[in-house]
Each structure stands twice: as structure tokens, then as C-alpha cells.
Amino acid sequence: MSEATQSQGLDERLPPHAIPGLFHGMSTGSVLGGVGMTDFDNGEPEGWSFQPHPLNDDLTGDDEKRVMGAICDTRVHYHPRRMHLTLHRPIPSASALNRGADAEYTQAIDPEQQAITRIEFVIPSDYPQAEYTVEREEDGSRRVNVISSASPGREPLFTEVTCFHPVRNNRTMETDGPLIRGDDIYVTKEYMEIVSDFPSDKDRMDQIEYESMQGNDVHENGEPVGLWPEFEKPIELVRTDQSGGRTSFSLDASYFPSAKRVTRPTAADNFSYVTIRHKDMDTFAEVQFLVAADASKRAREEEWESRMFTDLSIGTRADEGVVTPA
């Protein structure tokens, strides 16, 4: 198996020098409808992949067809060792660590001064995982109980972390055709030491979500879970500032296993950090993604140049007296 194949679902497809940098947050609107998941392949080294296909046959607008075509044009890969967490309390950016800046949002001029609200990292393949058992009722009731049996403890994980900083003074929510434009996000990377049960418990949490998507009546250690579960746990993030000093941040975070970060290695569009939100086992109802600000600007410039070339061509043909059939 090639290295490129092994990294599918992990390696993000980004424009050159995009990080650190500004991205535009986008998501699909309801007009596109759901997206089906077919041709599943569980034979990849760790993760799985599928081919998306549109479920809405009533798309009429060119923009709608273009966006849905981009989403469904390429195979989608998911890797279970990639973890995305939402922080319950924002933490300062790396550039603000040395200044003792307040962790709360400010109307900062520089996007990198904005606080971090979400993080993402890859769990090493040899990182110990919590043990659990799945008990199924034999009376056909579809009741499933996922029981924790052993935890490896909160083993510190030192790794590269992708940090997402919503840019408050650029915050917006507007519709752009079939897409919804959300927050601008500044994206950075830094190394942190993560101390939490999240990395070791991911397999178990994913199993609970899988059982829920199967339509089972899922319980966690005897307690009902419900559809699209959210898992909250304490986390400690130990960071090193520019002078070499270590600062620890202790807070709570949430993991949403139904919101799956995926990659599309063969795609030709400029969608990065793509998240699909499961509706059921065979459907996802929403696609969220980021577009690098520079890439978005280049796309607009290319569209403008294309239109100008078309206008000039029409004007030249008219000047030359060329008659085209109606």
C-alpha cells in the first residue's frame, strides 16, 4: 500500500502556504438536499471511503448543479485517528501567549490575535485505546449497551495541533446561492501536549455513534444516549510560548462523532477541512468546508477575466461584422 493511500483521510488538501492564513467558512444550504453515500470501501488500512451522489433531482440552477457536482465528483475518505474538538472556553492564540492577552474574543486587528475555539489533531496508531464491550439484547429489541471495561489513563500526547480562530470582526451569515457563508476562520498550527481521555476513548465514542446510526436503542454504561451523541470531557492543553515558557490551560471540550472530518484527495475544487454531518448510515445532510481567502480571491479574478475575455470576443466579432445564427 502506497504512502499516499495510507494517508487518505489524514492529509488535508491545501493551497501552498495557506497556513497560517485566513479561510472563509461555507456550508451547503437546504436547497441542495441530502447527499447519498454509496460504494463503501472498508478495505483501506484504517479508515473507509465512499462515493457521494445527489438525492435531490430537482436542482435547476447552474450554481446548485455546480456545487453539487463538486461535492459528488470525487471519492470521500474518512480516517478514525483524526480528531476534532470544540473547546467550551476559548484559549489565547500563540501570538498572544507572550503578551498575557485575554483569552476572550476581542475586536483584534490581526486575525492571528483571535482566540482559539476548536482544535484538531491525529492520534498516533500506537496510542493505547480504552477497552469496552458491546452487549446486545437477545429479545430482538435492538437495545445495545456499550460498557467501558478498562481505561489506559490520561497518557500525555505531544503532537502538532491545527487551531481554528473565528475572526469575530469578520463574522457574517449570508446566503451565496446554494451556499451559506459563515465565519471567517484563521487557521494556525502549533505543537501542544494534550492530556485527556479523548484520544484513548475515541474508538468507544465512535462505536456508540455507529450503533446509534444503525437505529439501535443505545445505552452507555446503562444510560440512554440518543441520536447524534455529544461527548464532553475535561482536557488540559500545555503550550510553549516564544520564550520557552510552558502554559497550561484546563477546560472542557466536546466531541461530535456524527460530524466527520473527511478528505477528497482527487478533487479539483478549493474546498479544505471538509466536514460531513451524518443524517443516517447512508446519508449526510450538510457539508461544511473552508476556502482559503487567497484561493477564493483567485477564483473571483479568474471568473472576472473569463467574463471580460468573453465580452471582448463578442465586441470584436461585432466590430468585424460577424453574424452568428440566432
Image (spheres, grey):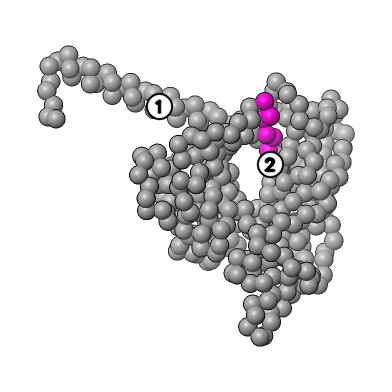
Please tell me which residue is depicted at 69% across the width and 64% down the height of the picture: 226
Q: Nearer the viewer, residue 68 or 193?
A: 68
Residue type indicated by callout 1: Glu
Secondary structure under the numbered disc 2 in the rendered image: strand
Horizontal arrangement in the rendering, residue 159 relative to residue 59 (left or right): right
Q: Bounds of the magenta span?
A: 164-169
Q: Quadrant of the C terminus?
A: top left
Residue 130: percent from the left, percent from the top? 77, 66
Horizontal arrangement in the rendering, residue 110 relative to residue 248 (left or right): left
- Circles 1 and 2, Cβ within 8 Å, touching? The answer is no
Residue type indicated by callout 2: Thr
Residue 275: percent from the left, percent from the top? 58, 48
CA gap, disc 1 and disc 2: 30 Å
Please tell me which residue is depicted at 37% across the width and 50% down the height of the picture: 58
Quadrant hosting residue 116: top right
Residue 133: percent from the left, percent from the top? 74, 75
Horizontal arrangement in the rendering, residue 151 relative to residue 323 (left or right): right
Quadrant hosting residue 53: bottom left
Give the residue pinned by disc 2. 162
Q: Relative to residue 135, is residue 189 depicted above or below?
A: above
Give the residue pinned by disc 1. 302
Please tell me which residue is depicted at 65% across the width and 62% down the height of the picture: 227
Q: Relative to residue 265, is residue 163 depicted above or below?
A: above
Task: Determine crowd level at label 1: few under 14, some 14-19, many 20+ residues with C-alpha closer than 10 A.
Answer: few
